[in-house]
Image (spheres, coloured by chain):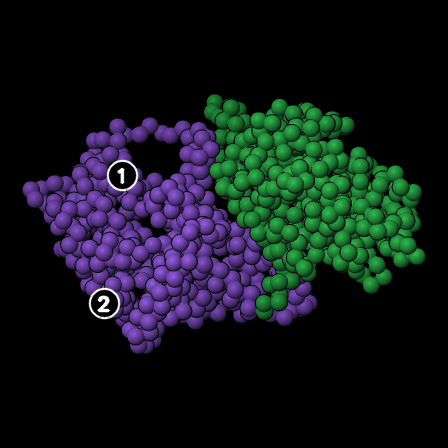
Chain colours: A green, B purple
Amino acid sequence: MTSAVSPDVIADEMRDELRDVARKLIDRHWSAQQARSAELDDRDLYAAAADAGWLGLEIAPEYGGVGATFRETCAVLAEMGRGLVSGRAATTMVVGAAVISAAGSVEQREQLLPGLADGTLHVAVGLCDSNGRTDLATIGVAATPTSDGWLLSGTVAFVPDAATADRVVVVARDGDGALSLFILDPAAAGVEIEPVVAVDHTRKFATVRLDSVAVGAGELLGQPGCSAAVVEWLLQRSAVAIAADSTGGAERVLQISTEYATDRVQFGRPIGSFQAIKHLCADMLVGSEAAKAAAERAAAEVPAAPAELPEWSEWASIAKLYCADTYARIATDGVQVHGGIGYTWEHDMHLYVKRAMMNQALAGSSAAHRGRLGQVLLAQR
Amino acid sequence: MTSAADNNTTASTDLDQFRLAYRAFLEANPLPNWRERARSSEAEFGQVQRDWIAILNRGGYAAPKWPVEHGGLKASVAQQLVMNEENQRADCPSQKLFEIALNHTGATVLNHGTEDQRAHLPRILDGTAIWCQGFSEPNAGSDLANLQTRAIRDGDNYVVTGQKVWSSWAHHADWCLLLVRTDQEVAKHKGISYLLVDLSSPGVTVRPLVQLTGNPEFCEIYFDDVLVPAANLVGREGDGWRISQTTLQTERGAFLLDRGRALERRFANIVANLPDVAESGAPLTPDTALVNDLATDYAEMRILLELCQRVLDKEKAFGSAGWEPSIAKLFEADLTLRIGEHSLASVGLLGQTDCGQPGATAAGETPWVLDHLNAFGLKIAGGTSQIQRNILGERVLGLPREPRPKERT
C-alpha cells in the first residue's frame, strides 16, 4: 500500500506526484510487449491498480474508495495512455464506478462499490448506439414495458472490456424516448457478448446484443426514464478521459521521437540537427503542451456529479476534439521522424498511431464534437 | 482558474473599485474626435497618441507597469487586464506609438540605466518623447547578433555609422534604443553595446517603409557619423546583447493574454457576421466545411487563452515562465493566420474591400483582409516562427544545433 493515494490529493504538485507513482507502477506491471499480445492479459496491472487505490479513486471512503476527484483520475489516465495500458482499470475509473455512485440506490452502492474499489468486481458500461455513435438522441436499446418490468432488445456497439465483465450496464430507451440505465448479468438469457477485434490492439471491445432480455427493478439503476443527465455526464467523463489518455500518449511519442532524432546519424550528423526534423519535433511539443492545457482544463470543468438535466460541456468537446486529433498528428509525425524503423511491427510507434486513431473515433468522434461546437457558433449569428 | 485564496473576496472588491475608478477617469477625460483626427493625417495620428498618453498621465494611468516613484502605477497583472477591458469599453485610443517607450525603454533604463538616463521617463509620460527600437539590420534579422552598425569611441562621444531596418513607428519617434557594434575583435555577441540615441541628432535619416497592408509602420534609419554622448551608453560596453535579451523576459503572460483576447473579439465578430448561405449557395449547417473550420478554430482559440493564462499563472508563481511563452506565441501565430483565412472564406468577395484607413483604427475595424495581412507579421516579428521552433527544439527538447560555418573570433 506504499503507493496508495490520500483523499486530499488536490494540488497540482500532488497530481504530478500521482503521475510519477503511476508511471513507475505501470512500468513494473505493464509493457508495450503485453500491449501487442492478443490476450492483453492485464490481471497483474489490474491488481496493482486496485492496490494503489486507482480503481476506487473517486469512490466515497465509506464504500472502500479514496474520495478523490476526476482530475486525479485523469492524471492516472494520462499515464495509462503513455504506457499503452489496456483498458479494464480505466473502464472502472471512468464509467464503471461513476455510474453506480451517481445512479445506484444506497443498496446497490453498498453491494457493488466495495467490489469495484478492490477489483473483485468489474462493470462494463455501453455508451454507444448500434453504430458506435454517442448521440443522446440515438443511444439506447429498446425498452418495452411488461407487467413486472421491461424487455430489452437491441445492439450496443464497442463496449469496452465487456467480454470479461461481471456486469454490463446498458442504456435503454422507452417508447417516449426517455432513457433508463440497467445493470445486467452477462449470463442472463438473451444477452450475447461478442468480442470485436479492433486495429488498435491495445484495447478490447465487444458488441453487446440483447434479445428480449427480461429486467425488473433489481436491474434498474436510478429512476426509470430519468437517466439522460447521467448518460450525458458519463459521455463527458469518457470524452475527457480519452483526451487525458491522448496527452500521455502524445508526450511519450514526442519523447521517443526526440531520442531517436538525437541518436540517429545520417550525413555525419544527428538527424535532429536538421531543421526539417527539429521543427517537426518542435511542432509536436507545441501540440503536446496545448493538448495538456486543454485536457487539464476540461477535467476541472466536469462536475463531480450529474446535473438535473443533461448539460453539455463545451470544454469536454474542445478537449476531446483537440487532444485526440493532435495525438494522431503527433503519432503520425513520430513515424516520419523514425523513418523505416517506425514503419515496422517490431517498433512501438504503430501502437501509438493506432491508439491515437481509435481515440479520435471513441467517445464521440472528432467530427461529432466539431459539429457540436459548430451548432453553438451558428446560434451566435 | 481561480486560486482559492482566503482573501479572494477582498481582492475582487479591490479590483472592482480599481475598475470603477479607472472607468470614471476615462469617462471624465475623453479625447474628443480622436478617431477622425487620427484618420486625417499621419502627423495628426501621432499627435493624438501624444495627447492621449498625456491625458492618462494626469490620472497616473499612463504607465501601468512602472514603479510609482517613476510616475507609474505598479499595477498587478489583474489590474492591467482590467484596464485593457475598460479601454475597449470606453473605445479610447491605443498606445501603439508608446509601446516601445513604455515596455522596452522603461524596463531597460529602470533595470540597467543611470540616474540621468531615468530622467527620460517623465518625458514619455507627458507625451513629449516617442521611442523606437533600432535592432534589426538588412543583414541582421533572425541572426540579430550579426549586426554591423558601428560605434567608435571619440572622447566623450560615440560616432555611429550604419543602417537599421524594421524599426516600427520610427518616423514618429524622438529617441531610439540602438544596438551597435563597439568591438570588431571579439565573438559577435560580445562586441555589441546598447545606446540611447536622440533622433534629432545631425546625420540621422528616417525613411518609412510602406508595409504590405499599405500603411507605413516600419522604417529604415540611417546613421551617418552621428555623435552620441558616451553618457548615453546603457550598462557597460559590450554588454548590449545581454541587456537586450534579458530585459523583457518577464511579463509575457499579460501581453499574450491581451492579444489572445483581441483575437477572441475578432473571432466573435467573424461569427456574428456569418452569412446564411455558404459560397456554394447551400445554407450553412454544422457540417459545412467553413463551419467545421471555424469550430476547430474556436476550440483552439479557447486553448490559446488557456495557454496564455498558464503563462500568467507561472509568472506569478515563479517570476518567469521560461519557454512556455514561445509555445503560446507559435500556437497563436498559426491559429491567427488560419482564422484570417477562414474569415475571408466566410465573406467571399465582400471581404476584399479596402476602406483605405490609416493605421489608427481600433482592432476589428480594419477590413478583414487587412487584419489578415497584418497577422503575417506574427510569424516574423519578435523571432520568426522558424527561429522559435529552433529554440524549442534545441533548448527545450535538447536536439543538437545545426553545424555552423566557423564564426569570427
Residue at the image point whose x is 18% and y is 44% from the top = B234
Residue on which the image places disc 1: B242
Between residue A61 and residue B354, name the one nearer to us: A61
Residue A324 against residue B373 in the figure, above or below: above
Report crowding for label 2: few under 14, some 14 to 19, many 20 or more residues within 10 A (C-alpha): few
Residue A273 against residue B175 in the figure, above or below: above
Q: Nearer the viewer, mark 2 or mark 1?
A: 2
Using the image, name the chain to which the residue with label 1 belongs.
B
Q: Which numbered marker is on residue B51?
A: none
Q: Is residue A47 visible?
A: yes
Say whether disc 2 or disc 1 marks the residue closer to the N-terminus. Answer: 2
* Quarter of the figure with residue B146: top left
* Amino acid at the residue labelled 1: Arg
Residue A139 against residue B319 in the figure, above or below: below
- Rendering coords of residue B152 (x, y %): 14, 41
Task: Assign a secondary structure to mark 2.
Answer: helix
Residue on which the image places disc 2: B58
Using the image, name the chain to which the residue with label 2 belongs.
B
Whether residue A218 sits left or right of residue A18 in the image: it is right
